[in-house]
Image (cartoon, grey):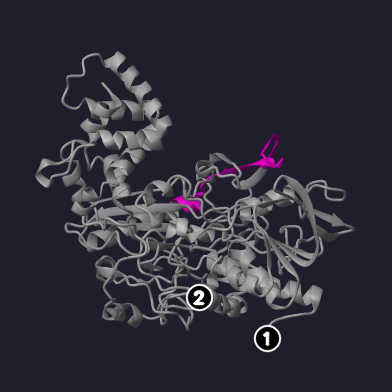
Amino acid sequence: MTFLELCQQLLPGDARHAIRAFSLEQLKTFQQRFPNTCTQIEAYLQQFVEQRGDLNQPHWAEAFMQYLKNNNNLAHKQFRLELLTIYCLDSAMLQKLGLPFTPLFPQGQTLDNMNFEALEAVFERGPIWRQVD
Amino acid sequence: MDYDVLVVGAGAGGAAAAWYMTKLGLKVACIERGRWQDPNKYPSTGLDWEYRKSSDYSYNPNIRNLPEDYSIDCSDSDIAIANFNGVGGSTILFSGHFLRFHPSNFKTKTLDGVGVDWPLSYSELEPYYNLNDQMMSVSGLSGDPAYPPIDNLLPPIPIGQYGEAIAKGFNALSWHWWPSYAAIATRARGGQNPCVNLGPCNTGCPQGAKSSVDVTYIAQAVRMGLTVYDRTTVTKVFVEEGMVQGVHAIRDNQAITLKAKVVLLACNAIGTARLLLASKQNAHEQGLGNNQGLVGKFLMLHPLGYVEGLFAQPTDADMGPQGCCIFSHQFYETHPDNPFKCGYTLHVLRGGGAIQTACGGLDRQELKWGSDFLAGLQSLYNRRAIISVICEDLPEVGNQVLLDDTRRDKDGLPIVKVKYKLGDNSKAMMSHGISQAKKVLKEAGLKSIRGFGPVPDAGWHQLGTARMGVNPRDSVTSPIGEVHDVRGLFVVDGSLFPTSAGVNPAATIQALSLYVAEHAAKNYFSRGLQ
């Protein structure tokens, strides 16, 4: 099993929302940006394959992630973060979540103004701090 | 090079003191091991901000591992230390949540029989809190029944649908809640732009709305003549005949010496203790201020609990300043019904981005890899509520900062080690706080509610390792922050705190820094601000 196959099993996309699977192009970005992780995960993948043998199981990728977590949780978390980072840089993916597909700055976000009436009961209950002077 | 005042550290406390001294017309230099920050490069200017929050802008120095960082051995600590080294210090990454102490926090020994009393009161510190609020563009709402009057605030950060939904939970229980006090400009002010609700304040604010001290105190002080030595690491404070003389430092791999009449230390409770202990010299064989063996002792860290839940429908939970929404002091004051002394803040936080939501969902097994990943993420994003429980930490002598003389860092300083265990009072308090926070979320209609603590990597608030006091036998500095056995050497950071209270400490660190600076200026330069 290859690194690309692992990533595509974990993130196969969503046909209903026309979101593609983790792609070869994204793999290249991953390898450029996080080469050490690629090497490390490939090594663990090889160990996993040697130990588990037959990988024609429907959820082998999830089983691998559990294996990785059990053996090296730090590497597991780092790989997960980097995989999702590369995947989420796909603007179509972010748009499906209702996220802007531009950096947060400078657009920002708008929040509703507060309903101050909700504070009246708090105010009316009076002071709750201890006077000490 | 000779100065009137040297300030070591350009974070919350150092910047306030440097500004004060510079405003008096003194010749002041601020020395900072980190570098000036470029807001154009802050993570939220790019799409990969969440990744960078866990790498070059991580709050864990051992992960960040930048040239200006020093490793901190937390292997014997229940809580890992969080900080940031740069001009602005940890205010570059802080969330801006900006609560004051309560008056009772200054008298825990007299009132509750625990901890020690401060050598000053809330009313004595109040003018400095007020000045600091203006300098830090603090926003909030006057009239809060949890505090003595606090006025002249900018309008509060909007709490959004999310905040209003959680507030309903507090109201159903008839518990106190209030919009957060925030060191975030909600209107254009003094060179700062108004907040535009980017979200991740704790990766730096490219908008310039969050009041990190590089855009507030330091910016003003530089215009008045402050010199800033960035990328400069102080290795030793040197003293002659009981009087501070200056510091030795390293800059661009060159040793330099800076002299001054007054030196103010502001390296946070880890860094300041480290520097005092490392400054061994004649007549100070145990380090400076350490004749009683108290430097580094009584470390306090604000153990943190987290309670989370899910809304049935999306809100704006993941939008807006992540650390500033609403808070509650319902259980802040000591109460006879509680199985602990002192109390805690219930602090409502906002969520993170898509990746943080996904990772959390995978950890909790609410989300699975594979073809349902996106649908699963959509069911979680913008729906998570978080309440943190900020517990007052009592001073315990065994919680401490030590130097490991067998190991040296790249600057030749001994490696610093933190020994910290949660005390029984903190454990009882945290358990209570988690239980009460769950009630709030339940009343607010959330599901899948869970709580845990202590959060292991939440050592942002480092306090107490050079505590102030009246009696030199149980304190490191005098009531005005001057190191007992070294004239002209002061501390202006959270190391001074005899007790921790149950709130974010930045507002009190800065108010206290202004207080100490004023006394130092009066005593050594016969100057002061009106």
| Lower position in the chain sequence, tag 1 or tag 2 | 2
Q: Pointer 2: residues within 10 angstroms few (<14), some, or many (20+)?
A: few
For disc 1, the chain is: B
Furthest-right residue in this view:
B241
Circle 1 sits on which residue? B530
- Which numbered tag is attached to residue B439? none
Circle 2 sits on which residue? B191
The image position of residue B521, as x and y in percent, is 75, 74
Can residue A15 be seen in the rendering of this structure? yes
Secondary structure beneath label 2: loop
Residue B387 higher or lower than B138, as above or below: above
Image check: A123 left or right of B398? left
Secondary structure beneath label 1: loop
Q: Residue at x 90, y 58 (%)?
A: B241
Q: Residue at x 58, y 64 (%)?
A: B12
What residue span does the magenta drawing correspond to? B403-427
The image position of residue A41, as x and y in percent, is 36, 27
Can residue B498 be seen in the rendering of this structure? no
Residue B110 higher or lower than B148, as above or below: above
Q: In this view of the protein, which residue sits in the foreground, B256 or B427?
A: B256
